[in-house]
Amino acid sequence: MAMKKASKKQTSVAALPEFQEFRRVVASLQRDCKSQLETEQEAKEAFSFLNSQVKSLRAAFATLSDLVVEEVDNMRSDLHKLREQQKLTLAELTEAARLQAESEERSKQMQRELLNLRSKVERDLMQDTQELRYTTKAHDGLIKHIENRLHGLHSMVEEVKHGSTECDNRHLQASLKALLLPLWRLWRRGFHSNVSKVSSSSTIWVHLAASSLEAFDRVLCALVEHGQDMALIQNALEASQKGMKDLSRRCSRAEKDQVAGYEDLSRRCSLAEKDQEEQRVRTNEYSRLYSNISDTVEVLTTTLKHSSHPDRTAQQKTSVPEPSCPGRDQVVQYIPEFRPI
């Protein structure tokens, strides 16, 4: 009989519209809980996938950073070597410029000395030529004077020859020879001395000119060789400058790639952090909803227990007014504050 009464009471309770509403609320909450659990599982899987992707990105970025740093170090060492080579080349160019300046100064000094020698030789030559002209004129006058005297003597000799004896002729010839011999010696000695002086001065001038021309040719050859060395050094300097420009472009390109890699990685990390934050918020919402569902189920179970014992409810009616069966909106009032799992 008791069983029949209990079954009748349960059927009467099950027939209540509030109980039907509770059942619908519980079924909907169970469906929501199931879907939210599935969503939470998917979110956990997505979160684990994102964590693995972030770890792989961090590992790849670490490897990329090591490679970029190694490449930058290599470029810096190459740049340092090129700078050292450029310093050596500049030192060589400075030394070559100093040697060129010294050679130019020596060539200018030799040219000045050559000009001085030429002017001195020309002055001496002009002076010797003038002296030769003066002596030649003097000798010509002396020769003319001697010729005039000889003609006079010859005429006198002719006159005396017709009117004198042989002894007088011999005496006259001896006196004539005694007169002409010193004059001839004087003329010959002066003429030959002037000619030898002029020839010696001209020989000296020719030797000086030849030696100066040889020295000038040597200076020109040295200047040509020095110009070739300067051209080679200039080509080497241009090649080193070109290599330094290429290396600087490579360094700037590597720095730009590194900055772009850092920016890309930071952007991806920020996106991953945002996804993690969203996943954390969704997980907190799911845990809060799960706790609310569990609290609601507890409230429903306690309500069903109270409805299955009418004697206790009758005793409670005398002391406490009977609460109305909570609906969905009233169940929400029992939702506690957020409690993490």
Image: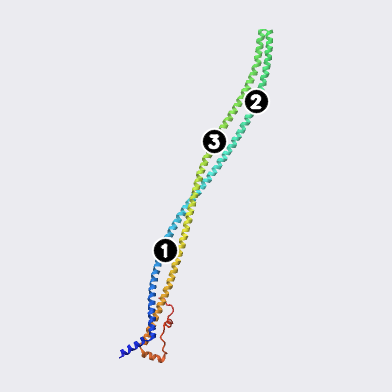
Which residue bears the numbered disc 1?
57
The residue sitting at 61% across, 24% down in the picture is 195
The residue sitting at 67% across, 17% down in the picture is 147
The residue sitting at 44% across, 71% down in the picture is 278
Q: How crowded is mark 2: few (under 14 residues within 10 Å), some or many (20 or more)?
A: few
Which residue bears the numbered disc 2?
133
CB-based contact (under 8 Å), mark 3 and mark 2: no
Would residue 297 be visible to someone looking at this image?
no
Kind of residue at disc 2: Arg
Q: Quarter of the image containing the N terminus?
A: bottom left
Q: Is residue 18 left or right of residue 127?
A: left
Front: mark 3 or 1: 1
User: Disc 1 on helix, strand or loop?
Assistant: helix
Sequence-wise, the earlier of marks 3 and 1 is: 1
Kind of residue at disc 3: Asp
Is 118 situated above or below 317? above
User: Disc 2 on helix, strand or loop?
Assistant: helix
Is 111 situated above or below 53? above
**Residue 20, percent from left and from top:** 38, 84
Query: To which quarter of the image does residue 175 belong?
Result: top right
